[in-house]
Amino acid sequence: MLSRQTYLDIVTTHIKNKNLVKHCLAVEAAMGALAQHFGEDEELWGRAGLIHDADWEETGEDIHAHTKKTIEYLQQAGETEERIVETVLTHNYRNNGYRAPESNMEWALYTCDELTGLIVATALVRPEKKLSAVTTESVLKKFPQKSFAAGVDREQIGLCEEKLGIPLPQFVAIVLQGMQAHLDS
């Protein structure tokens, strides 16, 4: 597995929007926390989260190509870790023609990707505008409000229960705590 710095370099080379870079960092933190929950390799899971949207700016117009360029970037850098490749590809399976997620690592990325956006949106409407001010309860209060962060796919997040065996409140708590522990508030 390549170093975290190599992954971060790939992300910052291909993503110029600082908020999208922050999103990748948020998903990295969430994936690390979920790996810890499952007793898995936090670095491995974190790398998948960090790199998952590296091609978003270049493929944004063509959702079907999203993730495929990221895999090219990884291969050019010499990455041979198949679990990362599989996880990145499956997080866009509905659009890229790849198979659906199967492993906990794959489902974790698929479900937490959207949740990080909801958590950030919740932080931004608080008076402090800080991640540290967000609670699990405040995220869960916003969750059913479809007009709030309307682009967030709640069904995708909700698959945490069926696919990962984690009740939604616990899933929100794990992801939120992971983000709070690793990101600037």
Image (tube, rainbow, N blue to C red):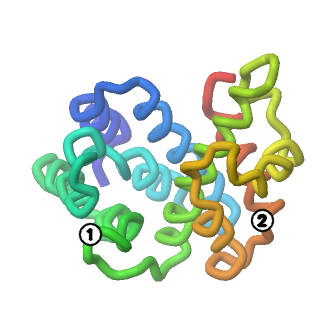
Say left or right for 15 vs 151: left
Q: Which residue is under mark 1?
A: 96
Give the SS element for disc 1. helix
Quadrant of the snapshot with the N terminus:
bottom left
Give the SS element for disc 2. helix
Amino acid found under the numbered disc labelled 2: Leu
Task: Identify the mark at residue 38; answer none if there is no mark.
Answer: none
- Nearer to me, 135 or 36: 135
- Nearer to me, 68 or 145: 145
Residue 67 in the image, given as x and y percentages of width and height: 27, 58
Q: Is residue 12 visible in this depiction of the protein? A: yes
Say which of marks 1 and 2 sits in front: 1
- Nearer to me, 120 or 104: 120
Residue at the image point whose x is 54% and y is 49% from the top: 151
Distance between the alpha carbons at the discs numbered 1 and 2 = 27 Å
Say left or right for 53 vs 106: left
Q: Is residue 83 visible in this depiction of the protein? A: no
Residue 140 in the image, given as x and y percentages of width and height: 82, 52
Amino acid found under the numbered disc labelled 1: Asn
Mark 2 neighbour density, 10 Å: few (under 14) some (14–19) many (20 or more): some
Residue 61 in the image, given as x and y percentages of width and height: 23, 48
Task: Identify the mark at residue 168; answer none if there is no mark.
Answer: 2
Residue at the image point whose x is 44% and y is 57% from the top: 44
The extreme left residue here reads: 76
In the image, residue 132 sits, relative to residue 24, either above or below, namely above
Residue 149 in the image, given as x and y percentages of width and height: 63, 43
In the image, residue 11 sits, relative to residue 50, either above or below, namely above
In the image, residue 168 sits, relative to residue 183, either above or below, namely below
Say left or right for 131 vs 169: left
Mark 1 neighbour density, 10 Å: few (under 14) some (14–19) many (20 or more): some
Work out whether mark 1 precedes mark 2 in sequence or the reverse, and give the earlier one: 1
